[in-house]
Image (cartoon, rainbow, N blue to C red):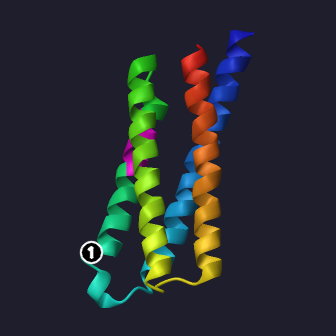
Amino acid sequence: MNDTKENKNNDNNLKIYQKYLELIYYSNNLVRKYPKSENFALVSEIKNDLYIGLRYLMYAIKSYQKQEKLKNLNEFDVHLNLLKVHIRLSYKYKYISMQNYQTWSNLITDICNMLGGWISSCIKR
């Protein structure tokens, strides 16, 4: 019984990891089209939040202690929220189209929903 629960958690962790990699690929393709003047500003911030978020996600997947896992998941959530702000700015400055904005936002929303479920499951245990 407990083994099945553990396998389900690992499957969910793998799904959020795969979805996050999809977000990284999509983001990297988009930021290549930004003006060169943004390479050391907005593009740098977006990439920084993406890779720091990935680091916290990996820490959370590898954590065995509930408190440590929750701490890493919360840090991951912070970087996702920062990424949302950067994407909103990108759209406002017209570096991306409405469709890019919607696709990017939907990817992040999917990850946030998965993350919310993961955090809830950690708190319930």
| Magenta portion: prevailing SS class | helix
Q: Which residue is mark 1?
A: 41
Is residue 57 inside the magenta stretch?
yes
x 45%, y 27%: residue:
70
Q: Up-down: is 102 above or below 114? A: below
What's under tag 1, amino acid-wise?
A: Ala
Q: Is residue 76 left or right of residue 107?
A: left
Q: Which residues are magenta?
A: 53-59
Q: Quadrant of residue 59?
A: top left
| Horizontal relation, residue 66 to residue 124: left or right | left
Q: Nearer the viewer, residue 58 or 88?
A: 88
In the displayed orientation, state which residue is furthest to the front. Answer: 92
Q: Quadrant of the C terminus?
A: top right
The picture quadrant where one finds residue 103 is bottom right
Q: Residue furthest top?
A: 1
User: Residue 74: percent from the left, percent from the top?
Assistant: 43, 36
Tell me residue 23's x, y (percent): 55, 61
Residue drawn 49% across the image and 33% down it: 61
Above/below status of 98 relative to 15? below
Q: Residue at x 38, y 23 (%)?
A: 68
